[in-house]
Image (tube, rainbow, N blue to C red):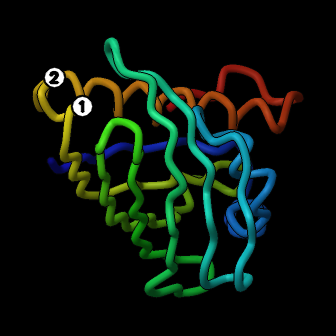
Amino acid sequence: MHVEEHVSMPVGLDEAWDFVWQTERLAACLPGCVGVDIIEPGKTYLAHMEDRIGPYRIEADLDVVVLESEPRERIRMRASGKDKRLGTSQRITMDVRLRPVSPTETSLDVDGDVEVLGKVATLGQFAIKRKVGDVIKKFGDNIRAQWPTTEGAGA
C-alpha cells in the first residue's frame, strides 16, 4: 500500500534537519513508539512499537535502516519487524524529503510503501491505510507541539 503525506514543521530547514536526527525526540512524536535503541547513529535503530488497530493489539520491534541520506534534503529508510504473538509482519520503505516552505516553515514530504501481512491484514487495505494516515497526522501534530510558541501552523 502506497502512502503520501505532508507534515508541516514550524521551523526553518536547518532546525528541521537537526530535529529529524534527534532520535529520541523524534521517536517520542511517533504514536505507538514506546522507545528506540540507537544501534549505529545515522544508520541503524531498533524501534519498539505498541499500538492497536481494530481489535488487534500489536507489539513489535522494528529494525530501522537508513538507506540514504542527503543532508538537509532527504532521508530514505526501511523498517521491518514482526509481532510474534499475532504472527503479523510489517515492512515499510519511506522517503522523507525536507522542503523549505518559508524561512520559518519546512514541509516533511513522506512517500512510502507499507506492507502488512498476517492477522492484521485481514482488516483490509482501507482500515490499514486509515490507521497509517491517523498515525502520520498525530505525528505531525506532535512535531508541531515541540515548538509551542507557534500559532496556527497546519499540515
**Quadrant position of residue 16:** bottom right
Is 117 placed above or below 56 here?
below
Q: Residues within 10 Å of mark 2 (few under 14, many from 20)?
A: some
Q: From the top left corner, tell me how far across and down residue 152 is, in percent.
A: 67, 20
Q: Do the residues labelled 2 and 1 touch (CB within 8 Å)?
A: yes
Mark carried by residue 120: 1
What SS does tag 1 mark?
helix
Is 92 placed above or below 10 here?
below
**Amino acid type of the residue tagged 2 in the rendering:** Leu
Task: Name the residue at 40% across, 38% down.
Answer: 85
Nearest the viewer among 68 and 43 is 43
Nearest the viewer among 122 and 23 is 122
**Amino acid type of the residue tagged 1 in the rendering:** Val
Distance from the alpha carbon under mark 2 to that under mark 1: 6 Å
Nearest the viewer among 132 and 40 is 40
Mark carried by residue 123: 2
Task: Name the residue at 36% across, 21% down.
Answer: 56
Q: In the image, 50: left or right of 95?
A: right
Residue at the extreme top of the image, as rendered: 55
Task: Name the residue at 41% across, 55% down.
Answer: 109
Q: From the top left corner, tell me how far across and down residue 119 is, in percent.
A: 21, 32
Nearest the viewer among 103 and 114 is 114
Q: Residues within 10 Å of mark 1 (few under 14, many from 20)?
A: many
Q: From the top left corner, tell me how far across and down residue 123 is, in percent.
A: 16, 23
